[in-house]
């Protein structure tokens, strides 16, 4: 290849680089930025940031926790739904727990490590999705002063699951139980169910393998329609959901009213102003933006220090 051809080819490549850089690196971003400044779009383009006292405190598109330094819910605020993103609503750890409906048996903690002062998580405890839901429901029930019981949950807030051991039929079902163990209840208290088909129910002992038995969830006597809504006990897929259902918001009205020393009807008036319907009238479900609601409450009914 001659030197003149070499120069000609590289000069053509350089011109293409400059033109594409001007289009994709300057003109296109500038066009998008100008479009984002159109009234009605600017707020969304800037992240839908909400402010208090002139300071940004969050986005209406990303949820956040309303808890104290110990992780306890602040009574004057409506609470968000649970989050599986990091320690809760961490944008850098967005995601779900990846636990499914078959996650009903816990991994128990080592009693020796618990006795040594380690936390349950550090001692190896991994709750199933069922126990996580049961514990959250019981906690919400205590916070809001309602019945937190749910089907397939024990009164202690763990999954009501038995390992039924004995001979099986052709379909794999135990026909004559010889031993029954409450697999999610360690031996610190009496099992949630005294007898199962005439066999005494035992509590689980650490280190024993109960997978040989048939795993049987027990529905129990909890109402089919729990007082605590589903979004109060389950995390969203992203872990950053900023909204809760109207049912969960209604459940929290009485507590928030007491904490702010106003009537429930006054809280409901503000709540009604922050309810959103289905998108385009048929997409999604009605919802309430938690941060926006709490900000408006702080403005209208501030909590005196």
Image: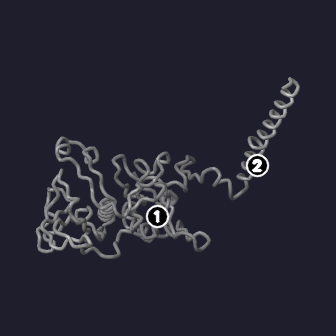
Please tell me which residue lies in front, 11 or 194. 11
Find residue 244 and name its label.
1
The residue sitting at 15% across, 72% down in the picture is 176
Residue 84 point in image, percent of width and height: 41, 53
Tell me the element at label 2. Answer: helix
The residue sitting at 60% across, 51% down in the picture is 47
Quadrant of the drawing holding the N terminus: top right
The residue sitting at 14% across, 59% down in the picture is 189
| Residue 118 in the image: above or below residue 153 | above
- The residue carrying pointer 2 sits among few (fewer than 14), some (14 to 19) or many (20 or more) residues within 10 Å by Cα, namely few
Q: Quadrant of residue 142?
A: bottom left
Q: Which residue is mark 2?
A: 31
The residue sitting at 48% across, 50% down in the picture is 94
253 vs 188, left or right, is: right
Residue 297 point in image, percent of width and height: 48, 60
- Tell me the mark number nearer the camera, choosing from 2 and 1: 2
Count every numbered label the image shows and give the total: 2
Per the model, the C-alpha gap separating discs 2 and 1 is 36 Å
């Amino acid at each position: 290849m001659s030197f003149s051809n070499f120069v000609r080819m590289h000069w053509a490549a350089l011109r293409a680089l400059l033109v594409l850089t001007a289009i994709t690196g300057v003109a296109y971003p500038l066009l998008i930025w100008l479009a984002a400044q159109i009234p009605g779009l600017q707020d969304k383009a800037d992240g839908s940031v909400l402010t208090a006292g002139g300071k940004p405190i969050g986005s209406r598109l990303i949820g956040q926790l309303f808890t104290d330094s110990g992780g306890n819910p602040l009574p004057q605020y409506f609470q968000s739904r649970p989050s599986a993103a990091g320690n809760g609503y961490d944008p850098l750890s967005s995601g779900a727990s990846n636990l499914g409906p078959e996650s009903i048996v816990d991994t128990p903690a080592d009693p020796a490590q618990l006795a040594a002062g380690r936390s349950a998580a550090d001692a190896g405890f991994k709750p199933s999705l069922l126990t996580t839901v049961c514990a959250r429901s019981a906690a919400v029930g205590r916070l809001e002063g309602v019945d937190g019981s749910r089907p397939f949950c024990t009164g202690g807030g763990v999954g009501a699951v038995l390992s039924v051991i004995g001979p099986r039929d052709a379909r794999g079902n135990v026909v004559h139980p010889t031993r029954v163990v409450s697999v999610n209840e360690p031996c610190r208290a009496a099992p949630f169910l005294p007898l199962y088909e005439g066999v005494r129910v035992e509590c689980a002992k650490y280190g024993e393998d109960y997978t040989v038995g048939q795993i049987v969830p027990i529905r129990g006597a909890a109402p089919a329609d729990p007082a605590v809504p589903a979004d109060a006990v389950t995390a969203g897929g992203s872990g950053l959901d900023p909204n809760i259902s109207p049912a969960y918001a209604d459940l929290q009205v009485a507590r928030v009213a007491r904490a702010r020393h106003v009537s429930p009807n006054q809280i409901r008036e503000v709540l009604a102003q922050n309810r959103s319907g289905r998108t385009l009238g048929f997409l999604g479900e009605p919802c309430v933006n938690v941060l926006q609601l709490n900000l408006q409450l702080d403005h209208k009914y501030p909590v005196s220090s």
